[in-house]
Image (cartoon, rainbow, N blue to C red):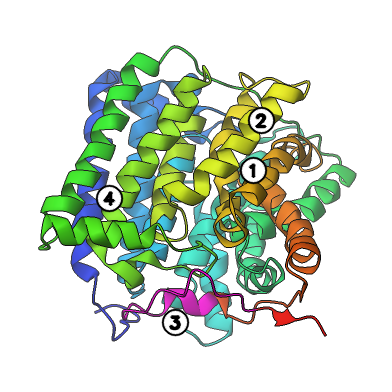
Amino acid sequence: MTEYQHPHTRYETMYPILLGYVGLLFTAGLLFGNFSQILPGLARIVLTEDALITDYILVAGPGPALINSALVTLLSVLILRFSGEPFNGMTPVVIGLMSGFSLFGKNPVNIWPILFGTWLYAKSRKEPFGKYAATGLMSTALAPVVSYIALDNGWGTIWGGLFAGVLIGFLMPSLTAYTYKVQNGMNLYNAGFACGLVAFICVPLISSLGADPTIHYRWATGYNAVFAPALAALCALSILGGLFLCRKPVWAAWAGYRRLLQTSGRAPSDYLRMFGPAPVLINTGINGLIAMTFILAVGGDLNGPTIGGILTVMGFSAFGKHAFNIIPVMAGVFLGGMVMHWSLSDSAVQLACLFCTTLAPISGYFGWPFGVLAGFLHSSVVLYTGSPVAGMNLYNNGFSGGLVAIVLYPTIIAIARHRKPTLQDEDYLELVEHDEPITPPDPDQISEEEDV
């Protein structure tokens, strides 16, 4: 018997798909690495300070990195399932984030204090943990804080790391609920923006106490020939699953995907509840192929961070991202690489090429030219937002995206649309509590008040 079982279980049968994905990660880890290196590699991962960018493939090799991802993903699936959270569009988002970022920052040890803090928050409010499980998992973007304090022998202690993680987990649910409204659904990585705010307080505080956190640049190269076929196969499997394995005629699945492409992606856009599993799986595979192709086309590297970015894009394919609203934003980053002093070959820029899609709703809601503008601005802003927090926020692009969204949204609304900007009134925490079907919004609908 679980602590909490929500009455809605419409998509619960999709949990075996997630377990199958975990199995693929385990299999890939065993195929890409020597079995005798798995445990030593996992130990190196756990004992490494995880500030951005710490590529576990470089730290321990592809096998241990993928096994670490499989372990973190399995824990995440079990937490979501047994906390009683219903399966909806947010579930693939969380799994994509956890599996992706466990290739460069998260491990089965440094995420637990934050999750425990979120559990304590739920208990303090006398509410079920299932309501906050997804938020707790996404808040593990600040897991490097736990690792840094616990492992820094010259300053921190294990108990200090545990306390910091618990405190972060306790604070994040209320903060993410607030920041969600401020961004008006234009930044999909809401948790990243909230984590960035916490990091902006946490890093100066621990620095004042004698710490000296620094950004890392551990970046693996030379794995494109290994990972490109594996990622392409995963994307193809997702597309074929959507077309042929969801108990829908192929034409109906494809028609659903075409309707999905007409949405803006403005949060909340739960594509699983709007269109069902088939279009979402097709969207997931196509978005993954787009993201991988973009990285390869600009001469980038497939490694822990970039694969993590691709998996994140695939996860958000159930909650706001599709080909029509991500390509203009990615084009904006590409344009930035053509006219600014930095290069698309820079590691941070390669990540921006992928994670800039957090601003996909701007493209979908206001039109592709504004999407290009958003990507162009994000490509520069994100290069500077990581330094003040010393890489302690893994979702740095989410923080940068929030800043860009907060500036662009009222500007575009007031100047280009001649309307009054309003704060979004949806409750962020209610997004994870429902799985009943909903009607997609009118793509031309503007909810802001007209100027008078």
| Of pointers 3 and 2, the one earlier in the residue sequence | 3
Q: Mark 4 against mark 3, which lies toward the viewer?
A: 4
Residue 235, given in percent of the width and then of the height, sits at 28, 39
Return the residue at label 3: 128
Task: Report the residue that reaches farthest toward the top.
Answer: 222
Residue 345, given in percent of the width and then of the height, sits at 61, 18
Q: Is residue 220 visible?
A: yes
Query: What residue range appears in magenta?
Result: 429-447
**Circle 4 — which element?**
helix
In reply to whether residue 443 is colored magenta, the answer given is yes
Return the residue at label 1: 372
Left or right side of 338 for 251: left
Mark 1: few/some/many CA within 10 Å (<14, 14-19, 20+): many
Q: Which residue is more in the foreground, 385 or 108?
A: 385
Residue 64, given in percent of the width and then of the height, sits at 37, 28
In reply to whether residue 212 is colored magenta, the answer given is no
Query: In whole angstroms, how far apart are the C-alphas of marks 1 and 4?
Result: 25 Å
Return the residue at label 2: 335
| CB-based contact (under 8 Å), mark 2 and mark 1 | yes
| Of pointers 2 and 1, the one earlier in the residue sequence | 2
Kindly identify the amino acid type of the residue bearing the numbered disc 1.
Answer: Val
| Of pointers 4 and 3, the one earlier in the residue sequence | 3
Kindly identify the amino acid type of the residue bearing the numbered disc 3.
Answer: Pro
Kindly identify the amino acid type of the residue bearing the numbered disc 4.
Answer: Ile
Q: Mark 1 against mark 4, which lies toward the viewer?
A: 1
Query: In whole angstroms, how far apart are the C-alphas of marks 2 and 1?
Result: 8 Å
Return the residue at label 4: 282
Specify the quadrant of the image occupied by residue 125.
bottom right
